[in-house]
Structure formats: structure tokens, C-alpha cells
Image: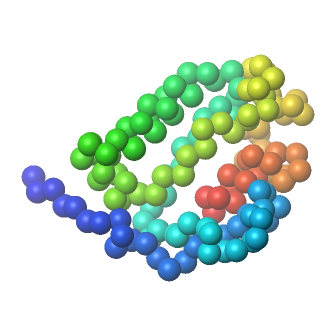
Amino acid sequence: MEMVTFSSREKITDEREELIDGLFPEADGDPETRPFKFNKPTIFLASRVHPGETPASFVLTGIWKFLTNEKSQQSKMLRDRFVFKIVPMLNPDGVYRGYYRLDTMAQNLNRYYINPSPMNQPTIWAVKKAIE
């Protein structure tokens, strides 16, 4: 089997990621500080939408370490072919407060992916904007 390799530089576009209005606005609002977009498929990974899913943090840490391992040919091939967008904790307030399933507004965030509100489910709203 022949291994095909190509540089991720071939896949970088001249476009930059857009700012998400109202979410961590940049101090100067300069779009030149945003990362470049890539012309390759995106893989989205997230964990801890339910704060009690502690093992998910360990799984995501393992995936993160694998993907960033510079000595692994498999990891390099994956990085060359895909953009990885990773959110390690979708419910940080619930995790901080020791909740098991809900956020600080007593919501199960898994129920709001279709139409999240930037005020009531800001993490789900931001994730949807980031992967659109």
C-alpha cells in the first residue's frame, strides 16, 4: 500500500475565520488576527455537555495527545487531511459547581442544539456558530 502525503499548507485559503458577534470580542476587532480557513473537512469534538461525564475529559485528553503527537505518522496524516475543532468542556459552569447533568439555569444543554439562545445557552450557540 502506497502512502500518499500532502502538506496542509496546500489546503490553507486566503480567507480567515469570522468573529462570532457578541462572543469574546477581540480588543481591536482586527479580522487579521483570526486564523486562516482550511479547504478540508472539519471534525468537531466536544465533551462535558453533562458535567457528570468526567470520563469524557480523559477520553478527549487522550485524543488531543494523540492528534498533537509530532512523532506519529497517523496523527500527521489526520492533521494533513482534516481540521479539528475541539471544545473540551461545553458546560464549564455546571462542572465548576459540581452538577451532574444540568447547567446553572437547570437546563439539559443536549436539548438545545436545534435552536440555542446566545443568552440562555451561550456555549451551544457558540459551538453551532463555530462549525457552521
State whether residue 119 is above or below residue 101: below
Count of labels in the image: 0
Residue at left offset 69%, top offset 60%: 129
Q: Does residue 47 appear left or right of residue 43 in this picture? A: right
Q: Quadrant of the C terminus?
A: bottom right
Residue 15 appearing in the image: yes
Q: Could you tell me residue 101's position as x and y percent?
A: 75, 24
Q: Which quadrant holds residue 94?
A: top right
Q: Could you tell me residue 74's position as x and y percent?
A: 27, 45
Residue 101 appearing in the image: no
Q: Which quadrant holds residue 111?
A: top right
Q: Which quadrant holds residue 39?
A: bottom left
Residue at left offset 90%, top offset 34%: 105
Q: Could you tell me residue 103's position as x and y percent?
A: 82, 31
Residue sticking out furthest to the bottom = 14
Residue sticking out furthest to the front = 28
